Image (spheres, rainbow, N blue to C red):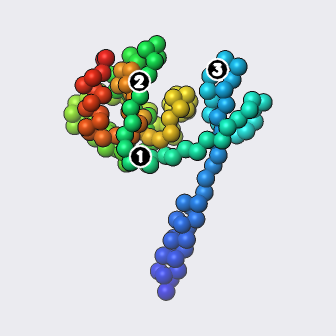
Amino acid sequence: MPRLVILLATTLLFSFSSLSYSEIYKWVDENGRVHFSDSKDTQQPVETVTLQINSYQHVSFESLPQNSSIANSTVKMYSAVWCGYCKKAKQYFIAQGIPFIELDIDKNPQAKREYKALGAKGVPVILVGNKRMNGFSVKGFQRIYSSSDS
């Protein structure tokens, strides 16, 4: 009987945890910079943004501006320890001998700020030269890695 109670309590706990959410606010300052925050404490007009974390069913690609400081990196990955796709990407990079920089957005405040400045909506976000990959697949990564300017 105690096991049944524990199982029921655990099931309820996990089902209620999926109902939780938080709002993210987006605004543009007078210099045209986009900002994101979890609080609405700005004098600027704000837009509520919904973020989907680690929910990729496909991989998307973007080119970064040529003057981006990120454009000079070899491979840079914004990740989180709980992200399965981040683990797959990391394992792939190591197995292939691909040098990379991993930045955990939950543990590194600077990485979190950079991630937000990119307007990212999930992890991993992988940067190769001036190419950006949201999510991870071997085929997709090979495409941007082989066409990279680095």
Disc ID at residue 56? 1
Q: Which mark is residue 32?
A: 3
Q: CA distance from mark 3 to mark 2?
A: 20 Å
Give whichever of 92, 128 is nearer the camera.
128
Per the image, label 2 sits on a secondary structure element best described as: strand
- Residue type at mark 3 is Gly
- Residue 5 lies, in percent from the top left, at 52, 80
**Residue 86 appears at what percent x and percent y?**
37, 42
In which quadrant of the rendered image does the C terminus lie? top left
Residue placed under numbered mark 2 in the picture: 63
- Picture mark count: 3
- Tag 3 and tag 2, C-beta contact below 8 Å: no
Q: Residue at x 38, y 32 (%)?
A: 61
Apparent side of residue 4 relative to residue 43 in the rendered image (left or right)? left
Residue extending farthest right: 43
Amino acid at dot 1: Tyr
Could you tell me which secondary element the residue under label 1 belongs to?
loop
Q: Residue at x 27, y 30 (%)?
A: 143
